[in-house]
Image (cartoon, grey):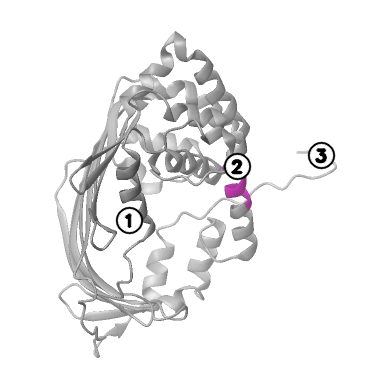
């Protein structure tokens, strides 16, 4: 079984749930409230703002703050490894924290050949298995597809275009389905098209109708989209037996392994929610902030016969401001080119996939 097939399926299911606006032309959608309880006129406000992106802004400032904490993560990595993904050294991490705070000035690309410009700085910290906290502070500039980095000891540069021509890195990314190989891109596109076939997903839309599972509310210019995973316990109730069976059938048609996991979802995800607060500037008709709060409690230990509970807490705040107010960004003149060294380091981050066994017509193996 290919991990990317599972990934696309999960991505598709999550996208169906988190999208407050869905363009659908089939009759199967007409009975589903895509505003999730929010008044139609209020729903239109946030949907129009989302569709408008950042309006006609040619430059802006982005403030980012991310905070992650996880415990009993070994079971999560074992589950991922079971799908065929080599988790490598991270599989030894049972507890982890991660934070990042940064501010970045952005200038939109002038045309398709222009990669845009960025200038900013961030501070990141992390720890694992309750060990010491590591902190990194860095200034970053991107101009003409060249990334400049400075950790306080001088500027270094990486030619992002040249990375595509690096055989070691490009080969690893292609084999993982992350590179620019046309054949691989076509293969991934075929997988995505199959996974996103709405015609065969009528059962999935029934999940959206579980009372309290998804809601969208408005408080002033803040629109809160919430997914309450505790509601999945309703799938275990007798009155929802038909819905559960339909979900299993739908998931099995996409991937047999997904069909196996659907009945386990209410047990594996015992509690948790995902909340996204979207702040709309009604004058500009744009969303100026996204505040994401995720808390999940996963009974993944049961897959190994353990009672250990995996917890994942993640907050991510992204705010846009200073529209059309960013000044000229200049590249440092004294940067040292480290493109080759960076490519070698990046290639080492990805495990080298094992070659697939080729079947022979004679043996049928």
Q: Which mark is residue 72?
A: none
Element marked by disc 2? loop
Q: Main secondary structure of the magenta part?
A: helix
Residue position marked by numbered label 1 in the rendering: 49
Give above or below for 212 relative to 109. above
Q: Is residue 199 left or right of residue 10?
A: right
Crowding around mark 1 (Cα neighbors within 10 Å: few <14, some 14 to 19, many 20+) is: many
Give the x, y percent position of residue 271.
29, 25
Disc 1 versus disc 3: nearer the observer: 1
Find the distance from the CA under tag 1 to the CA under tag 3. 59 Å
Give the residues in magenta: 190-195
Badge 3 vs badge 2, beta-carbon distance below 8 Å: no
Identify which residue is drawn at 42% across, 26% down: 209
Residue that mark 3 sits on: 363
Disc 3 is placed on an element classified as: loop
Q: Is residue 146 left or right of residue 324?
A: right
Image quadrant assignment for residue 329:
bottom left
Within the magenta stretch, is there residue 338?
no
């Amino acid at each position: 079984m290919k991990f990317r097939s599972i990934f696309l399926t999960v991505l598709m299911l999550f996208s169906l749930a988190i999208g407050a606006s869905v363009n659908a032309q089939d009759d199967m959608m007409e009975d589903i409230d895509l505003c999730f309880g929010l008044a139609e006129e209020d729903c239109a406000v946030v949907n129009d703002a989302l569709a408008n992106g950042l309006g006609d802004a040619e430059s802006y400032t982005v403030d980012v703050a991310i905070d992650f904490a996880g415990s009993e993560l070994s079971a999560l990595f074992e589950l991922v490894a079971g799908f065929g993904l080599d988790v490598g050294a991270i599989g030894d991490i049972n507890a982890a924290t991660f934070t990042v705070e940064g501010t970045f000035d952005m200038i939109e690309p002038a045309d398709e050949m222009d990669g845009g410009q960025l200038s900013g700085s961030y501070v990141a910290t992390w720890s694992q298995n309750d060990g010491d906290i590591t902190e990194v502070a860095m200034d970053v500039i991107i101009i003409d597809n060249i990334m400049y980095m400075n950790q306080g000891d001088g500027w270094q540069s990486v030619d992002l275009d040249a990375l595509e021509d690096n055989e070691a890195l490009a080969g690893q990314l292609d084999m993982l389905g992350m590179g620019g190989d046309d054949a691989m891109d076509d293969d991934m596109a075929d997988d995505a098209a199959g996974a996103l076939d709405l015609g065969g997903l009528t059962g999935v839309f029934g999940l959206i109708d579980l009372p309290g599972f998804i809601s969208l509310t408005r408080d002033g210019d803040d629109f809160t989209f919430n997914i309450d995973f505790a509601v999945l316990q309703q799938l275990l109730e007798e009155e929802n037996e038909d819905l559960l069976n339909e979900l299993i059938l739908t998931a099995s048609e996409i991937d047999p392994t997904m069909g196996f996991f659907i009945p386990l979802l209410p047990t594996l995800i015992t509690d948790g929610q995902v909340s996204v607060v979207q702040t709309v500037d009604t004058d500009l008709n744009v969303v100026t902030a996204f505040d994401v709060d995720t808390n999940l409690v996963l009974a993944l230990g049961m897959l190994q016969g353990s009672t250990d509970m995996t917890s994942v807490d993640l907050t991510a705040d992204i705010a846009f401001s200073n529209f059309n107010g960013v000044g000229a960004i200049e590249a440092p003149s004294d940067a040292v080119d480290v493109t080759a060294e960076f490519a070698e380091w990046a290639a080492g981050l990805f495990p080298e996939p094992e070659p697939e066994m080729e079947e022979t017509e004679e043996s049928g193996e």
